[in-house]
Image: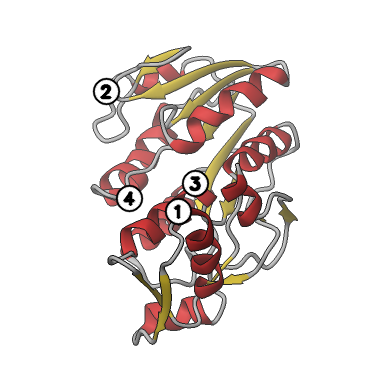
Amino acid sequence: MDVLVTGGTGRLGQRLLGPLQAAGHSVTQISRRGTGPGGVRGDLATGLDLATSLAGAELVVHAASDPRGDPWQVDVAGTRRLVEAVDRDRLQHLVYISIVGVDKIPYGYYRAKFAAEQVLLASGLPVTLLRVTQFHDFVDFLLDSARRGPVLPVPMGWRAQPVDVGEVADYVTEISAAAPAGGVVEFGGPEDLSAADLARTWASARAPGSHVVATPVPGKLSTAFRDGAALPSAGARGRRTYAQHLDG
């Protein structure tokens, strides 16, 4: 099958190439610069070269996102541009990579991801909306950024279920071969952990001597994370734990 991966240079996009090729697919990765093996240029923010890069694609894995920039322009408007540019006569399946909790957590980026899901559901295309939990190495980044000398503050009571990005890539490959779900499918890591537990595990491996401090955080966002909005309620689970990730 001819496969196009958007966000080909991203954390997940880079890991998708191997599993998809191993499954017998011909894979093209689209990014703004068109770099990397099998890379072509296409810009979701402007629509530049999108129709050309999407021509003939039978499977689209839509993994592009812009959490640090303007997700409403890239994730939402960009998804509309993608919908307009796909070859509807050829497309058999479009898998969109979303995040567990986008429908419950009051955070701007999550709202944009949820809006992009609605664009796809209204498009009439054969879609699967795959919501995944946070990647292990993203948790690493958050904890490293939060550390202040020997002190590592974390929100009290927040819960997460981080997942291995390689296992996500394998699961994307698996569901891509199945019939489109026409709605949401979830995939998460094997463990429901508090932010404090994650921080202690990370500190033991990466910053020995750090003192983890669980701090109450007010507001609706914090309430959602404490109530488990970031945890999958159904679907398959990965096997690699966060501690195993830290062990390499």
Of labels 3 and 4, the one closer to you: 4
> What separation in Å lies between label 2 and label 4 (alpha carbons)?
20 Å
Residue sitting farthest toward the front: 209
> What separation in Å lies between label 3 and label 4 (alpha carbons)?
19 Å
Q: Earlier in the sequence, mark 2 or mark 4?
A: 2
Of labels 1 and 2, the one closer to you: 1
Q: Earlier in the sequence, mark 3 or mark 4?
A: 4
Q: Secondary structure at mark 4?
A: loop
> What separation in Å lies between label 1 and label 4 (alpha carbons)?
17 Å
User: Which residue is label 3 attached to?
Assistant: 120
Query: Is the Cβ of the residue at disc 1 closer than 8 Å to that at disc 4?
Result: no
What residue sits 54% from the left and 19% below the top? 57
User: Which residue is label 4 attached to?
Assistant: 67
Q: Earlier in the sequence, mark 3 or mark 1?
A: 3
Q: Secondary structure at mark 1?
A: helix
Where residue 77 appears, as percent x and y from the top left, is 31, 44
